[in-house]
Image (cartoon, grey):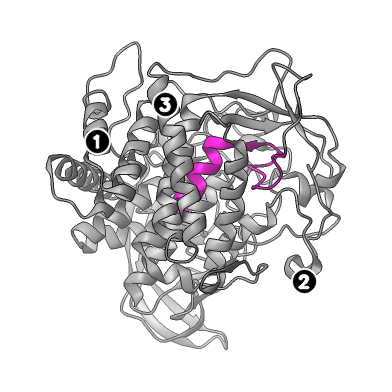
Amino acid sequence: MSSKHIYLDQVGFLPAGGKRAVLNFPAEDFTVTDAAGQVVYRGRVSHFGTDDISGVDTYVADFDDFETPGAYRVQAGGASSASFAISEQAYDGLFRDICKTFYYLRCGAGLSEEYAGLYVHGACHDTLAVPFADPAAPGRDVTGGWHDAGDYGRYSTAGAVAAAHILLAVRFFGNLKDLSFHIPAVPCDQGVLPDILAEVKYELDFLLKMQREDGAVWHKVSTRYHAAFVMPEEDRGQLYLYDPSSMAAADVAAVFALAYTVYKDYDAAYADRLLTAARRSHDWLMAHPEPVLFKNPPDSGTGEYGEWEDISNRYWAACALYEATGEEAFLKEAEGYTAILEGPMSERRWVPGLTGMGWAPVSGLGSLSLLLSGEENDLTGRVRAALLKAAEESVKVASRNGFGLCMKPADFFWGSNMELGKHLMILTVADLLQPSESYERAIQKGLDYLLGCNALAISFVTGNGERAFRNPHLRPTAADNVEDPWPGLVSGGPNAGRQDATGKDLAPDLPPMCCYLDRVESYSFNEITIYWNSPFVFVLAGIYEKRK
């Protein structure tokens, strides 16, 4: 490739939305050309400068006022950008792909050609699982759910969070229920569930199986160690249930309570079952007030998902149950946790505040449930203020780099694209609470970054963009003998930590945004997970709601 690059969103732009390209070379002006090579727009280039996240001396070409639908490229200084679209439907395919990824990650049932096309596989992980601590105990049916990431493990906390991101998107943005992405139909009292709710139900049904009769929730189910790079049906190792944790019980209680508020309009009996299960896990938490944390036992090696605290999880559960039931006891419980969540750092706990949107901490998910309750009280006021403060900080950070990205150098760790998703979720909610053009711009520029407006000129979503990444660290796409991975996978993205062996192949002094390799073996850069896709379901639902 030429050393001159024009970086932009390779998928495209909505006609009335923000539009920009970033150049890594000086130019006075730029043009936008159509598919026939005809110039349809001319503009001036402004110099931004060099920042510490990309190391690029950036020049910016804005064309916000060009709204004519079509396929285009930006040209400047003898260089040409990737192709992009301007259309009211610019993100439709992206939106469907990001949602359908969860179907491709289904465990248990095989994927048929009718719904999966080339990406078929047989039934998998359908044997009984036994407790790791007592393998002689009776086996348990825990079939179903989503494969979590590049491996075939299924993790209660991670699955609950991914499902919650999607269900919260449904609650905030009803348009998501209208999105069709061709998956098997699921009947309900009203006929069939909307596709997005049918898909989330597949995970919820699995989480119901992960709950013990006493309300405790197994932290995960997996083989002893990760499988080789084989198709899921070829991974036939013994399945183990790993010890319950208070984080798993709290997260599952929370997502069941949240799910109740959605499914009650479609399947009352199922919704009631979820709420009953949520109360059961909450009762277990009340009987175990001290943290029941999780660490992988010796002689095992699948994902750990250990956390330093369980207060954000308990807060989320209390908030979700309050929103689902209106019972004041849950609100008082949530208020009791905020002294720690908003308090000073201590040696005992990592204090996450009220806006954590990741798999850990999860306090922000509870805060969103409080907003959905519609109640005005001291806690909802503090939640609103915390979200707006975090959004303002993101806008401030975005103003400091040429890509307009709301991320600091320290945000480029393993799964940096989820960190981006968390920032964009907060900005999306803040824009609902207090509409602001600055929030809109920051959201658009964050999406632009994900889709190619970055120092690598790579779209971090498979199948979306002229230079989309193609080699996820993901067993089924590596083993299926299909050249391209299925579309809609979000890469973990640049990672200055370089935790896998391939990191040595990168120059030692690269800026954070450039620390990335598109290789199957590069798990610390290029793995995928369900909870790296799910924040962008929320963000895209917000964009489409605003478009309406």
**Mark-to-mark CA distance, 1 and 2:** 48 Å
Query: Where is mark 1, residue-wise?
Result: 329
Determine the image quadrant of residue 24: bottom left
| Separation of marks 2 and 3 at Cα, in angstroms | 43 Å
Stretch in magenta: 141-166
What element does badge 3 sit on? helix
Q: Amino acid at mark 2?
A: Glu
Q: In the image, is 486 to the left or to the right of 258?
A: right
Q: CA distance from mark 3 to mark 1?
A: 15 Å
Q: Position of residue 222 (x, y in %)?
A: 71, 32
Which residue occupies 43% across, 80% down?
Answer: 88
Disc with the residue nearer the chain's start (1 vs 2): 2
32 shown above or below 128: below
Q: Is residue 57 magenta?
A: no
For badge 1, the amino acid type reads: Ala
**Comparing labels 1 and 2, the label whose residue is closer to the camera:** 1
**Mark found first going from the N terminus, 3 or 1:** 3
Above or below, comparing residue 482 to residue 546 in the picture: above
Q: Which residue is mark 3?
A: 285
Q: Position of residue 322 (x, y in %)?
A: 29, 44
Point out which mark residue 86 bears. none
Q: Quadrant of residue 243?
A: top right
Category of crowding for the residue at label 1, using alpha-carbon neighbours closer than 10 angstroms: few (below 14), some (14–19), many (at least 20): few
Q: Is residue 373 visible?
A: yes
**First along the sequence among labels 2 and 3:** 2
Q: In percent of the image, x 42 and y 57: which residue is there?
A: 538
Badge 2 marks a residue whose secondary structure is helix
Disc 3 residue type (three-letter):
Leu
Which residue in the structure is indicated by mark 2? Answer: 114
Q: Residue at x 48, y 48 (%)?
A: 274
* Residue 336 image-quadrant placement: top left
In magenta segment, residue 165: yes
